[in-house]
Image (cartoon, rainbow, N blue to C red):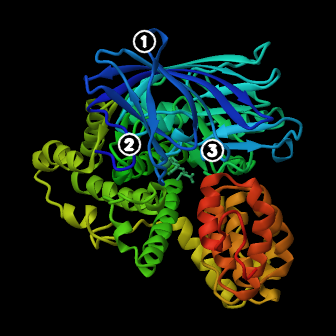
Amino acid sequence: MDPHSYARPEEARITHLDLDITVDLQGRALQGTALYDIDDKGAGHIVFDTDGLEIERAFTDGGNEAAFALGDSTFLGRALDIIIPTGTKQVGIVYRTGQDAKALQWLSPGQTAGGEHPFLFTQGQAILTRSWIPIQDSPGIRLTYTARVKVPQGLMAVMSAENPTALSADGSYSFRMEQPIPAYLIALAVGDLRFEPIGSRTGVYAEPSVAKKAAWEFADMERMLESAESLYGPYRWGRYDVIVLPPSFPFGGMENPRLTFATPTILAGDRSLTALVAHELAHSWSGNLVTNETWDDFWLNEGFTVYFENRICEAVYGQEYARMLQLLGRQDLKATIAKLTAEGHADDTHLHLHLEGRDPDDGMTDIAYEKGFAFLKLLESKVGRERFDAFLRGYFDANAFKTMSTERFVAYLDEHLLKPTGTTLNLQEWLDEPGLPASAIEPQSDAFAKVDAEIKRWNEGTPARELATKDWVTFQWMHFLRHLPEGLDDARMAELDKAFGFTESGNAEVLAAWFEQAIRNDYDPAFTALDRFLTTVGRRKFLMPLYTAMVETEKGKVMAQSIYKEARPNYHSVSVRTLDDLLAWKDNRPPASF
Ligand code: BES
Ligand code: ZN
């Protein structure tokens, strides 16, 4: 039973979607027909999830009109209940998306790299697909799909499916996803797009001015794919491509099958932020192949993926790189635990969540990622890597194209790993208790120890420009910026900026970490660049710490409100929802005191 879906799959469930839609970029709406093959158990009706959709009509086999009713509107949207005769094989729904459909972000030409064409992308996870397709929107319900999408001539459409590599003459595109996937992985992007191949199974889609740079940045993708396969078995989705979206994309990446959606903020120009690609690629096993049954089991998607990502990175970039990643992750985890605990949400630091009655997005924190990773790392250390790898490979094979709940995972783990190896473990403290268990292993990194030593020298009077930073990589700079002493005055900040050029950095991770320091230390010279960053980049992971730091002071609050007023129209609904909360916006309005 999924508390975040109105669907009743035990009565009737969808098995295949044939989607036929037109994309109206001017009117900012999608309209068309969703035709489903269904498995009807004879209950006399079928229930779909919708959110903001206008339902025009519903029909069954052969086009017979079907009576339907929409339920009350809640944070889950509205149930669409369609009456069907017993034995019904197909159900069709003619619909149109509403204003402010939560999954959709419609970009004006000015929000794109090219500046000439509008752009559209969707974001389905966790429960947003229902705002652009009437569907049974539960991760436990899988379907195959085909689609025909009509877009303005000259633009390209791509989906989480078999994709075109060239423009169509008339703007019509056809898609096919042959493997059954949950609704949250259905995705669409439309814009002025080009394809650049990388390896034989890999490539990148992006706007024309970005495509070549992106292909260079992601040159390691084919090697990542090969490493992933040699770790945990064949890649089962055919091709693996990435689309680089405009900067308002609210996440770093989203693992849409066959086509990862990614933020352009990973194009650092030196391939230093490609771990994100390894992460989304890893989801092709953990998440897309073996899928969390409900959002309470989110850690089964993300924790496994962080572990797998780390293994891919170790294989491709070496052990030190993997260790730095682990340590940055552990720093994030500790900060998240402290924050959630202080806010009275210690329950959200459990791996196994209880999100009923809440927006699942609210429970999706670093906990699933990094506490999940720490748990798997502990298992690895207890049974040895060889044994653990064999276990994981078996797990992905045995559960491919199925869902997994925390309870069933515990049973599987016990039977296939703990019992056979005689391993004992306090599962309760890992899964159902707050914080980080004492049994967690602390990652170590020599590269970060070097950074710590240089910070110490700076504190003791060595000028910034004389610090031994010559060979530092991006992760070391992030560690450096995260561990600067508190209360730096303008002169000290300027000394760093002059020596290392942080305000002008082309690396978004470095910039974001620097801006956080600039806000905390009220370092004015960085604020023009900060403003520019916040009005173009919509990646929530960057926005949250920056706005959070701003609202900690009176001056910062005013600055936050004025930047947000400018920037808000450029953000996707998932970022807007979180930031409205933080900045006390209500009904599209700033707080009265502002
Ligand atoms: N599946 C997530 C993104 C997501 C999570 C979307 C929850 C909606 C709800 C994706 O795989 C992810 O984790 N992205 C990270 C990057 C990663 C390297 C940790 C991100 O977006 O920052
Ligand atoms: Zn992920």
Mark 2 or mark 1: which comes first in sequence?
2
**Residue 468 appears in the picture as rendered:** no
Within 10 Å of disc 3 (Cα), the crowding (few <14, some 14-19, many 20+) is: many
Label 3 CB sits under 8 Å from any ligand 1 atom: no
Residue marked by disc 1: 61
Rendered position, 312 above or below 460: above
Q: Amino acid at mark 3?
A: Ala
**Quadrant into which the N terminus falls:** top left
Which is nearer the eye, 422 or 407? Answer: 407
Q: Secondary structure at mark 2?
A: loop
Q: Residue at x 36, y 29 (%)?
A: 46
**How far apart are the alpha carbons under marks 2 and 1?**
23 Å
Q: Amino acid at mark 1?
A: Asp
Q: Residue at x 75, y 74 (%)?
A: 561
**How far apart are the alpha carbons under marks 1 and 3?**
29 Å
Q: Quadrant of residue 242?
A: top right
Residue marked by disc 2: 6
The outermost residue toward the right is 116
Q: Nearer the viewer, mark 2 or mark 1?
A: 1
Residue 311 image offset from top left, x and y in percent: 43, 46
Residue 175 image offset from top left, x and y in percent: 59, 18
Residue marked by disc 3: 101
Which is nearer the eye, 405 or 134? Answer: 134
Q: Nearer the viewer, mark 1 or mark 3?
A: 1
- In the figure, is residue 174 to the left or right of 429? right
Label 2 CB sits under 8 Å from any ligand 1 atom: no
Within 10 Å of disc 1 (Cα), the crowding (few <14, some 14-19, many 20+) is: some
Residue 277 image offset from top left, x and y in percent: 57, 42
- In the figure, is residue 343 to the left or right of 484? left
The reply to whether discs 2 and 1 touch (Cβ–Cβ < 8 Å) is no
Within 10 Å of disc 2 (Cα), the crowding (few <14, some 14-19, many 20+) is: many
